[in-house]
Amino acid sequence: MSLIVQKYGGTSVGTIERIQAVARRILATCRAGHQVVVVVSAMGKSTDMLVDMAKQVIDHPSPREMDMLLTTGEQVSTALVTMALHAQGWDAVSMTGWQAGISTEEVHTKARITEIDPAPIQQALGQGKVVIVAGFQGISESGQITTLGRGGSDTTAVALAAVLKADRCEIYTDVDGVYTADPRIVSSARKLARISYDEMLELATLGAGVLHPRAVECAKQHQVCLTVRSSFSEEEGTIIEEEADMEQGLVISGVAYDKNVAKITVVDMPAKVDTLSNLFAVLAAEHVNVDIIVQSSYEAETTNVSFSVSGDEVKKTLDVLHKQRDTLQFGYVVAEKELAKVSIVGAGMITNPGVAARMFTCLAEAGVEVKMVSTSEIKVSCVVPLEDMEKAVCNLHTVFGLDTKEKAVVY
Amino acid sequence: MSLIVQKYGGTSVGTIERIQAVARRILATCRAGHQVVVVVSAMGKSTDMLVDMAKQVIDHPSPREMDMLLTTGEQVSTALVTMALHAQGWDAVSMTGWQAGISTEEVHTKARITEIDPAPIQQALGQGKVVIVAGFQGISESGQITTLGRGGSDTTAVALAAVLKADRCEIYTDVDGVYTADPRIVSSARKLARISYDEMLELATLGAGVLHPRAVECAKQHQVCLTVRSSFSEEEGTIIEEEADMEQGLVISGVAYDKNVAKITVVDMPAKVDTLSNLFAVLAAEHVNVDIIVQSSYEAETTNVSFSVSGDEVKKTLDVLHKQRDTLQFGYVVAEKELAKVSIVGAGMITNPGVAARMFTCLAEAGVEVKMVSTSEIKVSCVVPLEDMEKAVCNLHTVFGLDTKEKAVVY
């Protein structure tokens, strides 16, 4: 008997009929002799509805109260999925984040899981029950209800799979796997049968949107075997696992994008040893997520630092910077919005020099201006104008040979 | 500085505009220099919506999962009311039942509060915050989310007022006080300025609907000064307090009704000493709320027992009885539905013999059949056919002099 953790996203539990379908799928896994722990998101648009209500009441709702408000969405789903299993005659029990023993940092709207006590879930499993856990939420040490932020339910699922030593973690979503590029943009995009944690991590971070990067990171760290598949079909999904045994074939395995990027440039900072650390310490303290960082350092008394943030965090970032202006001693700040990040990802890159150059050539030939560049061992990202994003993605997909359907995806 | 507990019902927080109005009312109390703890119900029809969803999934949802589902409604209200106070620049914090230290029995959908730890609320009050508590809910010893059943938010408010030693507890609802009869049925019904706990208790139990009997009971027990008033007007409501200092004037102070009554008769039970205790122990164990009990005992080997239950509990009652048929050894069971209970309530009754007789005469003259009778020191209740209920209420209101507007209500 193996233990399987399944996660169903908001679309998968969007209506009563879909909740019933999810129950049937869970039941099929139970009947195959497995123990099952299920993590669910809030129903379809219910989170948006709650956010709307909050915005009607106040422009900037308190993060603590937002968590209080939003966590009800997952709680509703867990109860309904549990009832749907009962309706099929199977024993099941729902748990909120705190009931499932999920502890988090003392931070609201984007807390990280600090610890999970497996006892409550293990006890229920021992009684032959399916356990339905509210994703996206936990409890802080002081007893506050917290949320894990975007993609939090994926993280809940993987973290539970790790702590419970589950045999695998299945992420059910509205797409049937991980593609070489977004099929809505690139018609020739193909589904990958397998992908490594690292590549998935880059794809996830870069906005492929299928799986939250924190979830992949957690899966990699704890070697949780992850599957992404559709809750609306029986098709095989994409398996995400260690690349150790895989051959390296294609140079790159996917093209990803993130269309909500802004570039912030802090001009005329004192060129001291601690300038960078001061700047990013201040931003980190206020939980601003910085992505790409570019510093053009030269022999001078002042320096400029550019970094990218999510388009939603521009206002907050500027507020934080201006509040700390005396400490940071910069001249002024420039914010560029309406940008996108386009990235190519692939384990094959490590052994293939010149991949970045090929990417820049491709973008130059397409007339796409590159505003920032960031590279890692398995990816190259370029920040480009939002209006050029689609063109960039399609051209890269073609140039790197991902259109070729005949070519099997081997690593 | 006094401490005031306010409770706002579902209609009072039914829309964003109403939530904002509630926030303004809370704020006025704060600005008058009081500490305020607020208990809120779920928004308008949100509980009904959740119940509907559950019914779509399964005919008889598990009580535990219903509690899991329904408690989200109050949690949403607390967060929104808190945000509305923030929007007005006032510090406030929301709490679920378990965060507010409200412990209950290990029973679902109708748990009773066993204990309240005042520390979390007191701490927040000490920080100058208004505390917004989710009504209707608590946590059991084993960590399950429980609900207090119908009128649970009233009970939460009164219990908090008792534990926190509040100066008064204000119940805001969609009616502006306690009337001598339901104004929708009796056009000459008048609002009472004051009423005693005992009379209110009888009226509440009998279905006056303004205030839940458990809340009144709790208020009486802990001598909590209770006010019922409308959240939509500035009108004075009705004060409910000890009758010690009141003169007794009117014979009765109100006519109440409950239009959802069923009569169950268990026929041919063995006429033994423990027959009654066995029967009602079995019903109590399954949490069937029995109201009036009538046993026609005579010298024979068998006996019949009749009792009334809520119309909603007929099926459950019959199920319980039939399951225990071997133990209880009865012949058969008769269930009569479509009944109502009509009651007259008044502290004056104690010193006025013949009140019951006058009631029976009044009903007989109106041609209303009396199916069961129950009396206490301050009330007489008759179970009558539902179709005659309105006629019965109106005639009693007139016969007992409640139509007379000139007559001041003194006790």
Image (cartoon, coloured by chain):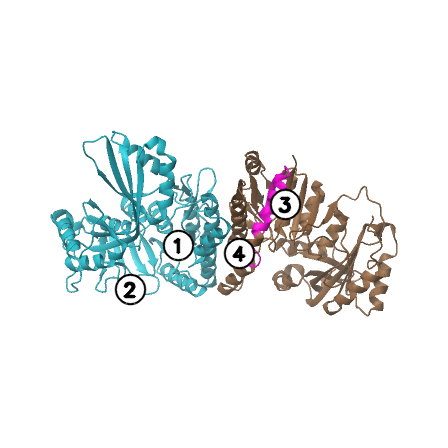
Chain colours: A brown, B cyan
Answer left or right for B252 relative to B261: left
Q: Are marks 4 and 1 in contact (CB under 8 Å)?
A: no
Residue type, label 2: Glu
Residue B220, image x and y in percent? 27, 46
Packing grade of label 1 (10 A; few <14, some 14-19, many >=20) is: many
Answer left or right for B259 relative to A324: left
- On the image, numbered disc 1 is attached to which residue? B38
Packing grade of label 3 (10 A; few <14, some 14-19, many >=20) is: many
Packing grade of label 2 (10 A; few <14, some 14-19, many >=20) is: few
* Viewer-side label of 3, 2: 3
Q: Are marks 1 and 2 in contact (CB under 8 Å)?
A: no
Residues under labels 1 and 2: Cα distance?
20 Å
Residues under labels 3 and 1: Cα distance?
39 Å
Residue type, label 1: Val
For the residues beneath circles 1 and 2, the answer to whether they share a chain is yes
Kind of element beneath mark 4: helix
- On the image, numbered disc 2 is attached to which residue? B235
- On the image, numbered disc 3 is attached to which residue? A6
Q: Chain of mark 1?
A: B
Answer with mark 1 or mark 2, whichever residue precedes in sequence.
Answer: 1
Count of marks placed on residues = 4
Answer left or right for A31 relative to B223: right
User: Is residue A88 depicted above or below A269 in this figure?
Assistant: above
Q: Which residues are magenta?
A: A19-46
